Image: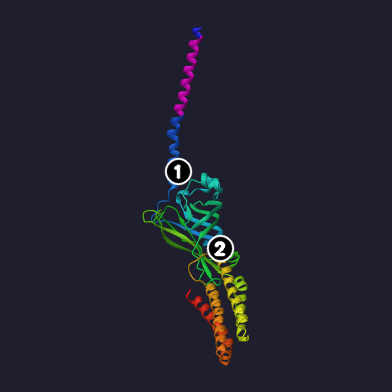
């Protein structure tokens, strides 16, 4: 019995020793071999060392503008961003690699398999949506790397509605390299010419008149020591289609204002009928103001359509004053003077109305 116990203890001690030896070898391999692999690739995760900043050539191909939101001052766009830079550490021999070009496509290959530095860009004026739909990285034998990424995003841009509905806007999307200032990484535009796809972009109520790319310096606290980063600015020029507002607001209200001038052809003794026509026009102008306020955002400044509505309102209010003056002259026995006042108002009111409209439109186009 004791013999079996002794043999069992020897066997257990032997297994424990083997297990300890195996664990020691594994830890030794992890400590010696694994850090060498990581340290050999660690230098690839920083920008290449060279005299001056790393030059990244950038291009953006605008494919479509999905929506322009006046109230939120945002626009949603889709396109393809291309970045190209040279990293001599990525150079390889095509004969040894067995390929003329190294390609990493998809999120897994790009994020997990490609051991290299790349300019991580962000949309500085992002407003909610920022979706990347695909990515591909191409590396040439000389170390030239090209990053192509398809994205769909919403950017916030200043929208000036002073000329509404005859306004045009310049929408801007600002891309920048995250974490590096312009002394470390600088962006340059590869091509400033607009693509044919951008000219064919269709937006409800808008027409794309052109787009351009430019490079601009932007203060940024997270950029680096200098705090100034290099950004790629996508500028899209759009012009509103005014026919919808002209058809529903401008033309009907102009006709209503002209019809309100019919009081100058009515008998001066029918004050009640004349006042009814004037007040119907006034209430119609108020209803149009309420309808337009639902279409426009809550803005503090004055717009062209507000000026048109207010001018129409005040002109129709002035017909009430004329009605009262004519009635007062008739009561005083000065009916001929009242008739002359009506005759002069028949041509004076339309001339003054259209003259003020012309001056207002010309002033808005010149000064706003």
| Mark linked to residue 197 | none
Q: Is residue 258 above or below residue 191?
A: below
**Secondary structure that dominates the magenta span:** helix
**Foreground: 247 or 286?**
286
Please tell me which residue is depicted at 43% across the width and 33% down the height of the picture. Answer: 31
- Give the residue at the far top of this rendering: 1
Q: Secondary structure at mark 2?
A: strand
Write down the residue under mark 2. Answer: 68
Magenta part of the protein: which range?
4-25
Write down the residue under mark 1. Answer: 41
Does the segment drawn in magenta span residue 17?
Answer: yes
- Give the residue at the far bottom of this rendering: 336
| First in residue order: circle 2 vs circle 1 | 1
Q: CA distance from mark 2 to mark 1?
A: 45 Å
The type of colouring in the image is rainbow
Tell me residue 105's x, y (percent): 56, 49
**Foreground: 21 or 125?**
125
Please tell me which residue is depicted at 50% across the width and 13% down the height of the picture. Answer: 8
Q: Is residue 182 above or below residue 308?
A: above
Q: Is residue 89 above or below residue 272?
A: above
């Amino acid at each position: 019995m004791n013999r079996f116990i002794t043999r069992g203890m020897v066997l257990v001690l032997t297994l424990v020793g083997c297990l300890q030896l195996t664990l020691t070898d594994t830890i030794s391999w992890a400590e010696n071999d694994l850090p060498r692999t990581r340290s050999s690739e660690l230098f690839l995760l920083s920008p290449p060392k060279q005299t001056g900043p790393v030059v990244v050539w950038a291009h953006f191909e605008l494919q479509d503008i999905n929506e322009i939101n006046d109230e939120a001052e945002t626009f949603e766009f889709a396109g393809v961003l291309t970045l190209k830079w040279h990293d001599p550490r990525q150079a390889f021999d095509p004969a040894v690699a067995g390929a003329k070009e190294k390609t990493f496509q998809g999120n897994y290959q790009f994020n997990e398999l490609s051991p290299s530095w790349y300019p991580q860009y962000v949309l500085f004026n992002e407003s909610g949506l920022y979706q990347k739909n695909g990515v591909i990285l191409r590396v040439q034998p000389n170390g030239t790397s090209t990053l192509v990424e398809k994205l769909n995003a919403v950017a916030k841009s200043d929208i000036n509605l002073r000329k509404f509905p005859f306004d045009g806007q310049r929408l801007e999307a600002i891309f920048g390299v995250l974490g590096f200032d312009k002394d470390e990484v600088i962006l340059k535009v590869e091509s400033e010419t607009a693509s044919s796809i951008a000219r064919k972009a269709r937006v409800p109520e808008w027409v794309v008149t052109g787009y351009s790319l430019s490079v601009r310096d932007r203060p940024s606290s997270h950029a680096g020591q200098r705090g100034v980063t290099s950004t790629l600015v996508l500028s899209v020029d759009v012009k509103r289609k005014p026919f919808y507002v002209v058809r529903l607001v401008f033309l009907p209200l102009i006709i209503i204002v002209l019809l309100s001038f019919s009081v100058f052809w009515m008998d001066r003794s029918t004050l009640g009928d004349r006042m009814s026509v004037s007040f119907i026009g006034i209430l119609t102008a108020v209803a149009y103001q309420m309808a337009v306020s639902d279409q426009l955002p809550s803005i503090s400044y004055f717009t062209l359509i507000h000026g048109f509505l207010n001018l129409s309102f005040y002109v129709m209010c002035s017909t009430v004053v004329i009605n009262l003056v004519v009635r007062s002259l008739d009561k005083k026995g000065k009916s001929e003077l009242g008739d002359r006042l009506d005759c002069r108002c028949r041509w004076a009111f339309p001339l003054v109305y259209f003259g003020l409209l012309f001056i207002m439109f010309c002033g808005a186009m010149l000064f706003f």
